Image (cartoon, helix red, strand yellow):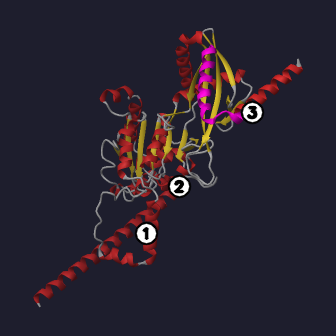
Amino acid sequence: MWTELSSTITALSVAWFMFDKYFPYQLRPYLERYFQKFVTFVSPYIEITFHEFTGERLKRSDAYFAIQNYLSTNSTKNAKKLKADVVKDSQSVVLSMDDYEEVTDVFNGAKVWWASRKKSTPSKVISFYPGTEEKRYYKLTFHRRNREIIKSYIEHVLKQGKEIAVKGRQRMLYTNNPSKNWYGWNSTKWGSIVFEHPATFDTLAMGTKMKEEIKKELIKFSKGKDYYAKIGKAWKRGYLLHGPPGTGKSTMIAAMANLLDYDIYDIELTTIKDNSELRKLLIETKGKSIIVIEDIDCSIDLTGQRKKKEEKDDDEADKEKDPISKKKKEAEEESKSKSKVTLSGLLNVIDGIWSACGGERIIIFTTNYVDKLDPALIRRGRMDRHIEMSYCCFEAFKVLAKNYLEIESHELFGKIEELFGETKISPADVAENLMPKSDEEDEETCLKNLIEALEVSKEEAKKSQKKKQRSRLRKQTKRMAKHAQKKQKRMV
């Protein structure tokens, strides 16, 4: 028997060598094609593949991830090769089927086989160090006699996978990777970490009435799928958060995400080369998410693309003569010029045809200087609601006092309320003064620290006001002197 087996293997090896050596290379694809047809004709099994990416790698397949979730619960029973992922502060381990592993499943008496596969292809990016792109997919195999129930089985798998994803879902904070890292082994357009910000609307330093309005609006939006479809509008909503630094714009975003149980996509525009890359990033985002561009007036030069260059006054001209100022300005312009994202491209992403590629999204811009933004960027319909994050008021202070000191009233509240009416201070500064720095500091010490900070802010505001008045007076005096000189010259 061993002699016959050895001779058979030797004969097959010689035949393969002769085929590989002498069979024309041009005819091999035809041979492979007809061989596959023959195998398909003879074999009683049917195969269905579910790829990770759809549409020329533009979008990740929801079906692929639903199948992955479904198999993550069933594969642990049968599979011998598993992948482990530790989540939620190392408190739980998620197991999933490893690459090139196969498991079986039974549905209504029909037996099916699942296999995890990946295919490596040369990267299309020109580089000194060429890499490969991995295309992952799941292969479902079943007997042809079970063809009638496979559709019901796939619907069952997708439904179960989505339910598992909702139950075990972790909210994530995403940020876009530079485009040079979009290709190669295990590469993605978005990097992510677990989102664990504790901010809520209850701890947000803002007036109660305003908070309740925003909360009701957000909840209604999250339930408005049918309404948006009825009115023929993409299921999205835009918010512009504007105000001085330290007024809680980032905290507001975190509170929104925690209220709605949404992921956050933080877009860094300076790392995006052009409008095409911006669209690809948008396609990669999922529903139930908040897309954020913070400090949009500082990200890239979007504000001046529609404005004509104005003539500079004498003071600005003098500043341009200063070599240090000129060098700083050139460096800023050079950093902005690296990105070719245009105002038109950004508008198309947030409010054009591409904005409909997905649903249940909130788009948020933040800025410290709303006057610098192009009116087309923040008009109603794009940024549906403008929320001014202003300086801290007494009502917001009481929220912070409850958060930091766990008190709702104190004899010093009267003095603090009086000072809030006379000066401006950000919620971040108030919070810093209310936070105990040691075990010896009690609530009274912290409140006195805040009163001292308010009084200092009040004095600085007075000095600043006097300085502005003196500057205004000097300019007025100069204008009057110039006017008098011109009048004297005309008289001469």
Q: Which residue is mark 1?
A: 329
Question: Is 41 included in the stretch rendered in magenta?
Answer: yes
Write down the region rendered in magenta.
Answer: 20-44
In space, the residues marked 1 and 3 are separated at their CA atoms by 68 Å
Residue 432 shows which numbered tag? 2
Can residue 47 be seen at all in this image of the molecule? yes
Q: Residue at x 37, y 37 (%)?
A: 213
Q: Secondary structure at mark 3?
A: helix
Q: Secondary structure at mark 1?
A: helix
Q: Which residue is mark 3?
A: 17
Residue closer to the observer: 27 or 280: 27
- The percent coordinates of residue 302 (x first, y second) are 37, 55
Q: Is residue 124 left or right of residue 421?
A: right
Q: Are marks 1 and 2 in contact (CB under 8 Å)?
A: no
Q: Mark 1, residues whose alpha carbon is within 10 Å: few (<14), some, or many (≥20)?
A: few
Mark 1 or mark 2: name the one nearer the start of the chain.
1
Q: Mark 3, residues whose alpha carbon is within 10 Å: few (<14), some, or many (≥20)?
A: few
Q: Is residue 327 left or right of residue 141?
A: left
Residue type of the residue flagged with mark 3: Phe
